[in-house]
Amino acid sequence: METVCFRFSHDYIPKIKSLEGKHPRLSFDLQPAVGSDLETDKIVNGKLIRSIRTFLHQDDMRLRVVIDLAKNFDYHVE
């Protein structure tokens, strides 16, 4: 088991989307997102989680969070 925690400035329950296949990943969007240091890539290299990427869409101030997962595992997210 591996755990990823995000700290938000207010209550937020993300709608998580998953993509299976060659490059499995989870993603969710935060809106509105504010701040100047929101974009980052973090290599994790865990057994299940490979990396966490974020990208700020400036046009609608939406932050996309992507969690890249290792292949060949079954995942349960809560």
Image: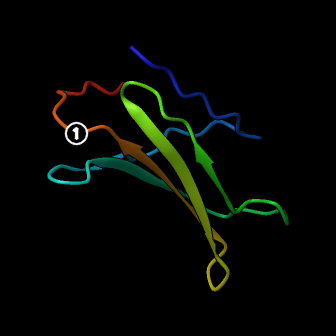
Residue at (82, 60) in percent of width and height: 37
State the image quarter where residue 71 is shown. top left
Picture coordinates of residue 47, whole percent (x, y): 38, 24
Residue 6, horizontal then vertical, whole percent: 63, 34
- Place of residue 64 in the rendered image (x, y in percent of width and height, measured from the top left): 53, 61
Q: Which of 17 and 69 is in front in this view?
A: 69
Number of marks drawn: 1
Look at the image and tell me in which quarter the N terminus lies.
top left
**Whether residue 57 is situated above or below residue 24 in the rendered picture:** below
Left or right placement of residue 71 versus residue 16 in this view: left
Which residue is at the far top? 1
Image point 42% across, 34% down: which residue? 49
Judged from the image, the secondary structure of the residue bearing numbered disc 1 is loop
Give the amino acid at mark 1: Lys
In front of the other: 25 or 77? 25
Residue picked out by circle 1 = 71
Task: Name which residue lies at 70% across and 34% down.
Answer: 7
Residue 32, placed above or below residue 9: below
Quadrant in the picture for residue 48: top left
Is 62 on the left-hand or right-hand side of 69?
A: right
Point out the residue furthest to the right here. Answer: 36
Q: Residue furthest bottom?
A: 59
Q: Is the residue marked by circle 1 packed among few (<14), some (14-19), or many (20+) residues within 10 Å?
A: some
